[in-house]
Amino acid sequence: MQKQQGFTLIELVVVIIILGILAVTAAPKFINLQGDARVSALNGLKASIQGANTLVYSKAALAGKEKSASETVDINGTTATTDDVSTVYGYLSSTGTNFTRALEISAQVLTADVTTGNVTSTGDWAIFVGTTNVKFWQNGAPSTCFFSYTPATSTAVPVFSAIPAATSC
């Protein structure tokens, strides 16, 4: 029979050092998961608005309203006005009501732009309608973590700003 031996002290120290190196290199990858999630949520909202805009433009074109600077389009095909959205050249105009109706999201329209701190909203999203664009934040996100929507003009389709990097979210 052979005598069983355990690990030497040097072997244990080497394993602990290797685990420490792995922890130091892997930890930063997992630290900013919340920022990555916020960026993904913003990308999802942006894609939803783009899809809604495509559908609204299609309905406006079918009704012959896609070339007008100000029209109302019924998005659900009912006689009720609670599902109507206002359009600018066939695309969603910059009102908070339009986005909550077209996307069916829980959002609060803010009365002031948020420039510092975290954004708080009674809904899942916060919307601020400015003079030239509309800003979208996820509830609880830093003020730097948003994207903006600039409505269509007679010569251009709507424009979306770039989604910020996860480091600012």
Image (spheres, helix red, strand yellow):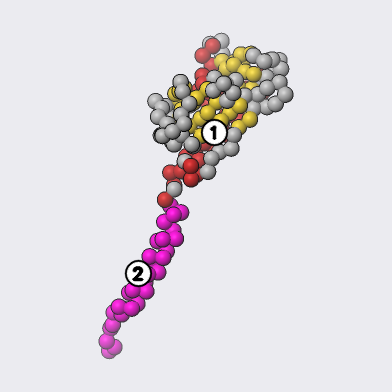
Is 85 included in the stretch rendered in magenta?
no
Query: Sequence order check: which comes first, mark 2 or mark 1?
Result: 2
Figure check: 95 above or below 137: above
The quadrant where residue 149 appears: top right
* Tally of numbered discs: 2
Secondary structure of residue under mark 2: helix
- Give me the disc on residue 45: none
Query: Label 2 crowding class (10 Å Cα cut-off): few <14, some 14-19, many 20+?
Result: few
Note whether residue 75 is visible.
no
Give x and y (percent) for residue 144.
Answer: 48, 36
Looking at the rendering, the stretch of residues picked out in magenta corresponds to 1-30
Asked whether 116 or 161 is in front, the reply is 116
Vertical arrangement, residue 15 with respect to residue 31, above or below: below
Q: Residue at x 64, y 27 (%)?
A: 158
Residue 147's label in the rendered image is 1
Location of residue 104 in the rendering, given as x and y in whole percent from the top left corner: 50, 25
